[in-house]
């Protein structure tokens, strides 16, 4: 199992992750730290909890927007595929030489969320 020391707002937390996910987790933590620093500059002296809440709300908003855009793209691609394959289904066209009439399956998205663990805060100096 991999492990990363994540430092946010001067606090270090040891976070476990699946082997091979340490670089991704480090990059995600760096992105979050950058967002928190920006929010701290924008809102001034507010509590860490408030900054984390605002960051969580912004990230959730981005996630919802991304899901909506993905749903729209999937619906449009499905409609285009249906339009393109309609002659095949009706028997008015010949299938491709490969005999394949369906697109290949997409790979599963990479995610650390299912295996991430969070441990109590650690002293950043002791690593």
Image: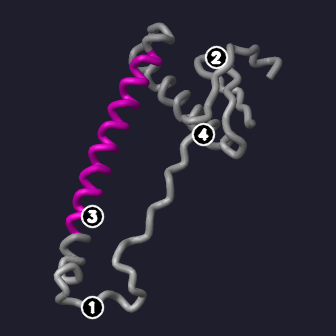
Of labels 3 and 2, the one closer to you: 3
Along the viewing direction, whichever of 110 and 8 lies nearer the viewer: 110
Determine crowd level at label 3: few under 14, some 14-19, many 20+ residues with C-alpha closer than 10 A: few
Whole-Å distance between the Cαs marked 4 and 2? Answer: 17 Å
Q: Earlier in the sequence, mark 1 or mark 4?
A: 4
> In the image, which disc is placed on residue 10?
2
Is residue 61 a member of the stretch shown in magenta? yes
Residue at 66% over, 26% down: 6
Q: Secondary structure at mark 1?
A: loop
Determine crowd level at label 2: few under 14, some 14-19, many 20+ residues with C-alpha closer than 10 A: few
Q: Earlier in the sequence, mark 1 or mark 3?
A: 3
Q: Earlier in the sequence, mark 4 or mark 3?
A: 4
> Where on the picture, by quarter, is residue 99?
bottom left
Whole-Å distance between the Cαs marked 1 and 2? Answer: 64 Å
Residue 119 at x, y percent in the picture = 68, 19
Residue 37 at x, y percent in the picture = 51, 24
Whole-Å distance between the Cαs marked 3 and 2? Answer: 45 Å
Determine crowd level at label 1: few under 14, some 14-19, many 20+ residues with C-alpha closer than 10 A: few
> In the image, which disc is placed on residue 27?
4
Q: Earlier in the sequence, mark 4 or mark 2?
A: 2
Residue at 37% over, 30% down: 60
> In the image, which disc is placed on residue 77?
3
Callout 1 touching callout 2 (CB < 8 Å): no
Magenta span: predominant SS is helix
Which stretch did the figure color magenta?
51-80
Q: Earlier in the sequence, mark 3 or mark 2?
A: 2
Whole-Å distance between the Cαs marked 4 and 3? Answer: 31 Å
Of labels 1 and 2, the one closer to you: 1
Residue 88 at x, y percent in the picture = 23, 82
């Amino acid at each position: 199992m991999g492990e990363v020391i994540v430092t946010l707002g001067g606090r270090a937390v040891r976070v476990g992750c699946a082997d091979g996910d340490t670089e991704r987790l480090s990059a995600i933590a760096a992105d979050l730290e950058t967002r928190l620093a920006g929010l701290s500059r924008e809102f001034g002296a507010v509590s860490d909890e408030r900054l984390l809440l605002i960051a969580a709300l912004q990230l959730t908003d981005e996630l919802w927007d991304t899901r909506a855009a993905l749903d729209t793209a999937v619906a449009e691609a499905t409609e285009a595929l249906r339009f393109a394959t309609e002659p095949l289904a009706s028997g008015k066209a010949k299938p491709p030489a490969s005999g394949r009439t369906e697109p290949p399956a997409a790979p599963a998205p990479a995610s650390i969320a299912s295996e991430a663990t969070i441990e109590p805060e650690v002293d950043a100096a002791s690593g």
